[in-house]
Image: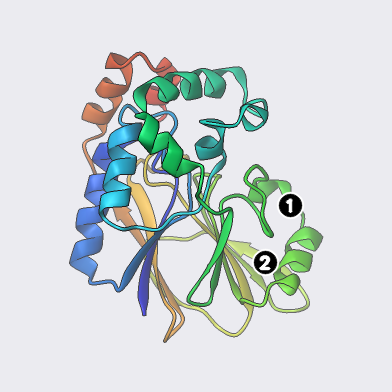
Amino acid sequence: MRIAFLSDIHGNLEAFEAVLKDIDEQVVDMRFCLGDSVGYGADPDQVLKRLFSEGIPSIMGNHDAAIFDESVLAWFNPQAMDAILKTRRLLAEGTVDRLRYLPKVQSVHGAYCVHGFPPDSLHMYLFEANRADVARELNRLKEKICLVGHTHTLGLVTWDGKTVESAPLLPGVILLGDDRYLINIGSVGQPRDGNNNAKYVIWDNEVNSLETRFVPYDIARAANKILEVGMPEFCARRLW
């Protein structure tokens, strides 16, 4: 089964639509989202409605939870908090209700999915974990593959039972082995890895291959819309 995993759309409709078009061209069996579909971008309601209408299942991200949970919002820095407060005004009531019921974690055909860090953190970044943390949590999972988002960067962490190794994920296909892997799948709507294309991955669970896709989109349009709806300027600037 070929599964397209995407994460951190962050209300960027232009990037999301470009990725959906690219996914259609790759012929996949399933699509799955690792959360943070809202926050920062100009079109959170449209993104969520497209996500739901396309039947793409999703787990919850920290920005998703902050829409309706003040205790989660308290974790945010002032700029991100401002973006969430403005995002709330752009969301229909029914859309917010659907966000409340997203699960924190889910196993997807042999891949364990969590937004931040296993087993169930919405907030912890992968770069905050040391090698012992990674080894411990991967050992606890029944799945050998763990997929995360949250950092907006791509990365492959391998645990072979003795050492933890990290490597970048570049465009193209790699074959995974029998080790345990923690895969940071990057961001659709706001990459922060020095390349402003939208990113997502395709995992083939039969041959255990991982393909990383870089997708161009209309950044100028997405950035201008952010400013037009009154989002903080940094939300637009980060797209470039």
The amino acid pointed to by label 1 is Ala
The residue labelled by disc 1 is 129
- Residue at the (55%, 38%) spot, across then down: 65
* Residue located beneath label 2 in the image: 165
Callout 2 secondary element: strand
- Sort mark 2 into few (<14), some (14-19) or many (20+) by Cα contacts within 10 Å: few
Asked where in the image residue 145 lies, by quadrant, the reply is: bottom right
Q: Position of residue 200 (x, y in %)?
A: 38, 56
Quarter assignment of residue 47: top left
Residue 191 visible to an observer of this rendering: no
Question: Earlier along the polypeptide chain: callout 1 or callout 2?
Answer: 1
Q: Which quarter of the figure has residue 8?
A: top left
In this picture, is 21 found above or below 92? Answer: below
Element at badge 1? loop
Q: Residues within 10 Å of mark 1 (few under 14, many from 20)?
A: few
The number of numbered discs placed on residues in the rendered structure image is 2
The Cα atoms of the two marked residues, 1 and 2, are separated by: 13 Å
Q: Give the answer, above or below, for where 157 lies relative to 60.
A: below
Q: Is residue 158 visible?
A: yes
Could you tell me which quadrant the N terminus lies in?
bottom left
